[in-house]
Image (tube, rainbow, N blue to C red):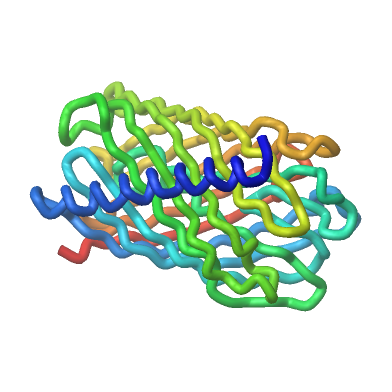
Amino acid sequence: MNKVAMEIRRFSLGNLLVVGLLLIVNISYASGTQWWLTSMGQITEGKYIFESKSQTEYFAFGLMGRGDRWALSVNIPYIYQKNGAFTQFSEIVIPADEVDQNNNGGMHGGNHNQDPIEDEVIIIEETITPKPENGIGDIYLFVNFKILGKNRSPSGIYLNSQVKIPVASFEKGLGSGEFDYGLSASFKKSINTFSLFSDIGFLVLGDPDDFKYKDPLTWGIGLGKSFNKAKFNTMVYYQQYTKIIEEYDPPRQLSFGANYRINSRMFVSIGWQKGLSETTPDNGLSGGIQWAIN
């Protein structure tokens, strides 16, 4: 497939996902909608394929709307990065001075269900340089829709999409300057106080001038447990990609999370991520707050 055909395919898919997002937004006004403000901070560090450790910190602020069968959110991160000399896509690393234009890389982000808990993987694209840089990151839109399952029940099958709008500074190395799109399906089943969830999907990545990226397939599986009448929830989640760089292992990561419902209008969450390959951080720690505004 030549470059023009690839651009047409990406443009068409991007338009389809954006139209779907706008359609769901319009539908939301026809029924009751609950809106939430969200905030999250995360710090990750790892040696990746290098001799010394690198560190990335970011804070994300967003807005999430939920209806009976759909949810959408927009997230805007603020990034601070230091140490190292490589390009990082979410938790995937590409050496900036060692990989030629024929090598590939990727990224992933997702949205597993409509619960107002920390179950979204926020995607951050950044290039880490020896000089610390900071600034606004790219904007991310997430949408999911329950295609099978009862209203007000967490169990069901969901269709999820995501779009990255490139607004981050390319000169500072905070973004690629390209649009990215993703589509996935997820399943969740609740049995008493336990929940089982899984997802499978793919990503279409915009190629900057210096690199060409392979569009990866992704999948994940997780288990959750609630306590004290669902006031406190815990989860463990394993996530993997297909191989996206010939020279390196595909990204693999294990995540642990906990959520506490302070009241019906506020949730707090914490999480820990453990990288299982050379293209994921060794460790990551995150925390967030979500509160209803209507």
Q: Is residue 101 left or right of residue 44?
A: right
Residue 282 shows up from this direction: no
Where is residue 264 shown, x and y percent of the image? Answer: 19, 54
213 to 75, vertically: above or below: above
Where is residue 120 shown, x and y percent of the image? Answer: 44, 47
Instruction: Give me the residue at 60% from left, 42% from top.
Output: 6
Instruction: Give me the residue at 40% from left, 55% from top.
Output: 141
Residues 26 and 73: in front is: 26
Instruction: Give me the residue at 32% from left, 62% from top.
Output: 63
Where is residue 130 shown, x and y percent of the image? Answer: 82, 73
| Quarter where residue 196 is shown | top left
Quadrant of image for the N terminus? top right
Q: Is residue 176 left or right of residue 264?
A: right
| Quarter where residue 177 is shown | bottom right
Residues 106 and 55: in front is: 106
> Total of numbered circles in the picture?
0
Residue 167 shows up from this direction: yes
Instruction: Give me the residue at 35% from left, 46% from top.
Output: 143
